[in-house]
Image (cartoon, rainbow, N blue to C red):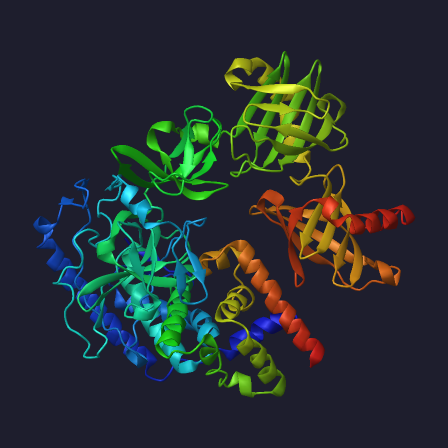
Amino acid sequence: MNDDDLSAFLMGEVPEPREDFWDDLRGRLDETAEDQTLTLAEEEGQDGEEELEEEDDDGAAVIDLSAARERRNLRWGGGAAWRSAAAAVVLIAGGAIAFNSLGDNNVQTTASESDAADETTESVEVPDESDDEGPAPTDSQSGPDDSQAVESDGESTGVVQLSDSEPAWWTPTTEAEIRFAPDDGDDTAAYAARSLAVLSTGSRVSVDGVERIQIDLLGADTAWLRADQLVRLGDTTPPIQAETYSPLETGSAVLQRLPGGDEALATLDATDQMTSTGRRALVDNAEWIEVEFPSVGIVWVLGDQVTPISDEQAVDQRQCLANGNDIMIIDFTDAERVSLTGALAVGDSVSALTGTRLTVPRAPQATFGMNITPVGAAEDGGSPTTAEEWQGDATTITTADGTVYTLVPCSDVTERVQQIDALVGQQLATDSPPAIAAGRSCYIHAGEALILDMDAAATTFTGVLAYLDSIQVFAGRVTTEMQGDSVVLDVNTSAIGSAEENGTPIVNQEQWELSELRAELFVPDRMYAQLGSCDDVSDQVAQLDQFNSSHPDIPN
Amino acid sequence: MALLMEDTGTAVRAGDVQAFETFVRANDRKLRGVAWAVVRNAEQTDDIMQSAYEKAFRALPDFDGRSSMTTWLHSIIYRTAIDFVRYEGRRRHSDLDAMRNVGGTSDAASQGIDRVELGDVMDQLSPEERATLMVVTGLGYSYDDAAEILGESRGTIASRISRTRNRISRWEEQS
């Protein structure tokens, strides 16, 4: 069944709305619009009532700059009048937040209660200047406001849905209850304070007068927590303009999952760049900035360890390296700083380069590989030469022949850079091969192997797919260089077919897709695989080599 | 802030019931596809859509326009449907299979034996897998957009699609 047939089936199954669906909806929307109007009027009359300062158990000041809360109450019940508790938009900063969802109803603690007692820091959210409406309305310190929980629905649960608020990050002040349904006493578990951050979905209920907020367990499930056991870290309202930051010096900045936390997710290089989300927090009077870092995601960095850089600098993805008078220029061509072009000027000869960074550095001493295909001497027309693997770290790149080039400010070698650009620039812009690694890559999925041999120009490839009981040989070309952050491969498997059937064509042309960072390969209808070590699939590698030696002229 | 709704070209301000309804009416079939895929029950699909539409209407002032309106609505509908399944499943003290098997009564499903059998395959998938299949194959979203709608990583989307296509392929081989 092809995609068109399956799509037709799926959409054909979708039922029409019931007869009175639109009338009912219109009534609900009219009621909502009226409530919003009333709420707005009520909030305008409560501006002077916002709580600005409270005391927590440790005596530290916690300033809640939340806006006045809405007071619209909704039913929590079943049947046609069922109202969802879901948030309108849930933003999840993925990663290793220490929730373990075991089965449907079991969340285990990952730190001891003493962790909570040891904590001395307090968080104060600093509202983004561009966000003049302020963050979400839930009161994190004083517990539920009795004025919110009104109008029980008459059922025995005692659950009343409160008005939704913006999704926001929270951390427990002490060990906190967690329940998968707001009134579900059987699912109570605990987790440690301050070692975790949880993201509320925006849905709030009152259970027997106690406010609970719904949280998202990183997309795995949702659960409910008591609002008075949480302190707010910040909201997820994006800023109008995000700033780009760079560390002040190599190794000075550390990314952390939580502001003030002790989990070092990555130590940054001076050349790294990150985009702020606009959210900031104060922890023990130190400013933290939430940023998006390409290899880690949404995380926090200490404000005094980074500096904002201009848009012009942020766009500049160029690095200049020198070995005496020999100069290397690396121009990253994507925001992830993975694909690159460049030039290597040695003596009187200038070679253009194209390549892909193989791994992302996560520590100052970490090295990363670069698959480089010298396009050839620019002055000779730039014929491709064999791919090489170079090694790099935060400040150096070592070429295949062992020559070490050290990072220098491009402003120190301006004239040389201009000479190189003049020789290489236009040629690279029009003739550079796709930004995909040349050479052999082995993708592995559950013991199955897909071995990809890309030619030096990174435009054609051969390989073998060891899938289930079949060893299938394929050939193809990179016809679509980049699609978003991915590379699309047009594969003509029918040109060769299954090796054990002596090359009988079995599949027509299809498209495969290499993900950003080239770490995953997606093969339609069959598998997706992770980039792995070819040593782990040596049997299949040997099969491919044997096939290649007996079929020197593989059709493509 | 006025929000331009794609497809209809309608500009909607927060609180504008008429314009919002016009937009969701015009797009209802493909919007409700996600809710249907999760619960596979017509009545529950209607309940979820009512709730999701109301929720979206209330959240219109917060819609930042970084994604398309339909992508944003689909994310709300999916989250609402999944929460419904989880809440109802717990309330009834039953597992998700109970939710999966109440559906399958659509007209389309009764039109032919092949469709009924493929509908059975759909019933055997998890709500998340069905939603992923609907978003990617039924509605034609890219993996990246599907990841945004479903709140999952791109790799998870790809693996779900791969698994569901494998199951459908096995069904084709057996039928």
User: Which quarter of the image is occupied by the N terminus of chain A?
Assistant: bottom right
Residue A532 position within the rendered picture, expressed as x and y whole percent measured from the top left: 67, 46
* The quarter of the displayed image where residue A469 is located: bottom right
Q: Residue at x 68, y 52 (%)?
A: A444
Q: Residue at x 46, y 66 (%)?
A: A103
Residue A256 position within the rendered picture, expressed as x and y whole percent measured from the top left: 40, 39
Q: How many marks?
A: 0
Is A390 on the left-hand or right-hand side of A288? right
- Examine the rendering and report whether any part of residue B8 can be seen: no
Is A178 on the left-hand or right-hand side of A92? left
Residue B64 position within the rendered picture, expressed as x and y whole percent measured from the top left: 34, 52
- Examine the rendering and report whether any part of residue B171 can be seen: yes
* The quarter of the displayed image where residue A344 is located: top right
* The quarter of the displayed image where residue B110 is located: bottom right
Is A345 on the left-hand or right-hand side of A299? right
* Residue furthest top in the image: A324
* Residue furthest right in the image: A550
Q: Compared with residue A350, is residue A279 higher up or lower down, i.e. above or below? A: below
Q: Residue at x 69, y 81 (%)?
A: B175
Residue A351 position within the rendered picture, expressed as x and y whole percent measured from the top left: 70, 24
- A511, B99: nearer the viewer: B99
- A195, A483: nearer the viewer: A195
Q: Compared with residue A534, is residue A332 higher up or lower down, i.e. above or below? A: above
Is A517 on the left-hand or right-hand side of B92? right
Q: Compared with residue A117, is residue A226 higher up or lower down, i.e. above or below? A: below
